[in-house]
Image (spheres, rainbow, N blue to C red):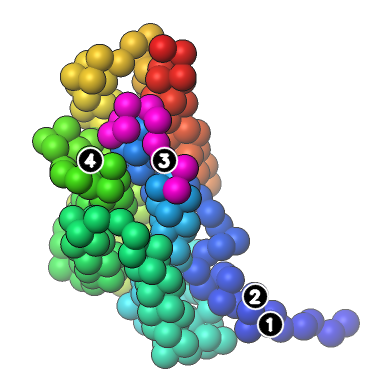
């Protein structure tokens, strides 16, 4: 029986994780929240399209850069050993070229937007490109990832209001705590491999307190969102969304307390629904006013 190698297009598809959209969705929920909150529940559909597509493009570009940076590391990790670059089926030069094209396309999307949004987009690109290298020396790279993953929040406010109020930075802080929670769950999957090769992750840094700190991060995330909602005068639908998200976080505790690979990965993926619950609360609160 002949085994056919995947085509280049399929390999590029995998390189930028279009076959695994969970990462793009985790970026999208906080960005959508920011667009709704900044516009009092009535975001311009053009901004929605720009930010949704831009989020997908930049996440894909970030994945290509990440795999380029980690190509010598990924081969030692069971979960990543067969990624396109690590397995030798896509070159590092190809990955960087794809990342550059995707970044240019994302940049083209924001050309109609104001100067502040464009300036913040430069910071966003720097964050996305530099994150893969932070795990070399930073003990909790997931915190830096939280900034990179949440930078659509100040950009959304800049695009809608022409400024970035203090509330936007509180929302970004909330996103940092959420990212710390779910990406530590993700890091717990690879902890044994990462210890062998000397990579720094929050799962290693937190040690035996990992589960407790994850739950504290979920609590901080929801508390900061609660404070933002109170500041904006949001009502019952918003609080219901937070309550559902809180129940999901407790469910994640039941998955991660044993620190087993598959349940931890399930908890990570389930954060898509936690983010959806928060956004549903925001959107429904404005819709039923």
Nearest to N terminus: mark 1 or mark 4:
1
Nearest to N terminus: mark 4 or mark 2:
2
* Image quarter hosting the N terminus: bottom right
Residue 122 magenta: no
Nearest to N terminus: mark 3 or mark 2:
2
Between marks 4 and 3, how big is the CA–CA gap? 12 Å
Residue bearing mark 3: 44
Q: Is 94 placed above or below 45 here?
A: below
Residue 40 magenta: yes
| Residue 73 x, y percent position in the rendering | 36, 76
Q: Is 241 placed above or below 20 here?
A: above
Specify start and end residues of the magenta stretch as a single range: 37-46
Between marks 3 and 2, how big is the CA–CA gap? 34 Å
Q: Label 1: state its secondary structure.
A: loop
| Residue at image location 38% in from the left, 69% down from the top | 108
Q: Nearer the viewer, residue 125 or 217?
A: 125
Residue at the far left: name it: 166
Q: Quadrant of residue 89?
A: bottom right
Residue bearing mark 4: 161
What numbered label is drawn on residue 7?
A: 1
Between marks 4 and 2, how big is the CA–CA gap? 40 Å
Between marks 1 and 2, how big is the CA–CA gap? 5 Å
Between marks 1 and 4, how big is the CA–CA gap? 45 Å
Residue bearing mark 2: 10
Q: Label 3: state its secondary structure.
A: loop
Query: Quick check: 141 left or right of 269?
Result: left
Query: Quick check: 273 left or right of 202?
Result: right
What numbered label is drawn on residue 252?
A: none
Q: Nearer the viewer, residue 240 or 135?
A: 240
User: CB under 8 Å between callouts 1 and 4?
Assistant: no
Q: Is 74 placed above or below 127 here?
A: below
| Residue at image location 56% in from the left, 62% down from the top | 18
């Amino acid at each position: 029986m002949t085994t056919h190698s995947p085509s280049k297009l399929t390999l590029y598809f995998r390189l930028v994780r279009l076959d695994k959209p969970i990462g793009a969705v985790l970026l999208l929920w906080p960005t959508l929240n920011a667009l709704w909150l900044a516009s009092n529940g009535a975001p311009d559909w053009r901004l929605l399209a720009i930010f949704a597509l831009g989020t997908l493009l930049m996440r894909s570009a970030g994945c290509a850069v990440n795999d380029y940076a980690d190509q010598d590391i990924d081969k030692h990790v069971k979960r990543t050993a067969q990624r396109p670059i690590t397995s030798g089926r896509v070159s590092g030069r190809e990955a960087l070229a794809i990342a550059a094209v995707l970044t240019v396309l994302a940049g083209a999307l924001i050309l109609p937007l104001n100067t502040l949004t464009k300036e913040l987009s430069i910071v966003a690109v720097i964050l996305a490109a530099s994150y893969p290298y932070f795990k070399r020396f930073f003990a909790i790279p997931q915190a830096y990832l939280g900034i990179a993953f949440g930078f659509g929040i100040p950009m959304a406010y800049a695009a809608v209001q022409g400024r970035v109020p203090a509330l936007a930075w509180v929302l970004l802080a909330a996103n940092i705590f959420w990212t710390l929670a779910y990406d530590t769950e993700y890091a717990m999957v690879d902890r044994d491999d990462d210890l062998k090769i000397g990579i720094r992750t929050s799962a290693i840094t937190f040690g035996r307190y990992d589960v407790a700190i994850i739950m504290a991060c979920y609590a901080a995330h929801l508390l900061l969102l609660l404070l933002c909602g109170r500041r904006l005068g949001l009502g019952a639908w918003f609080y219901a969304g937070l309550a559902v998200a809180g129940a999901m976080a407790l469910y994640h505790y039941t998955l991660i307390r044993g620190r087993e690979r598959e349940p931890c990965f399930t908890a990570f993926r389930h954060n898509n629904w936690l983010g959806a619950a928060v956004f549903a609360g925001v959107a429904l609160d404005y819709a039923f006013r």
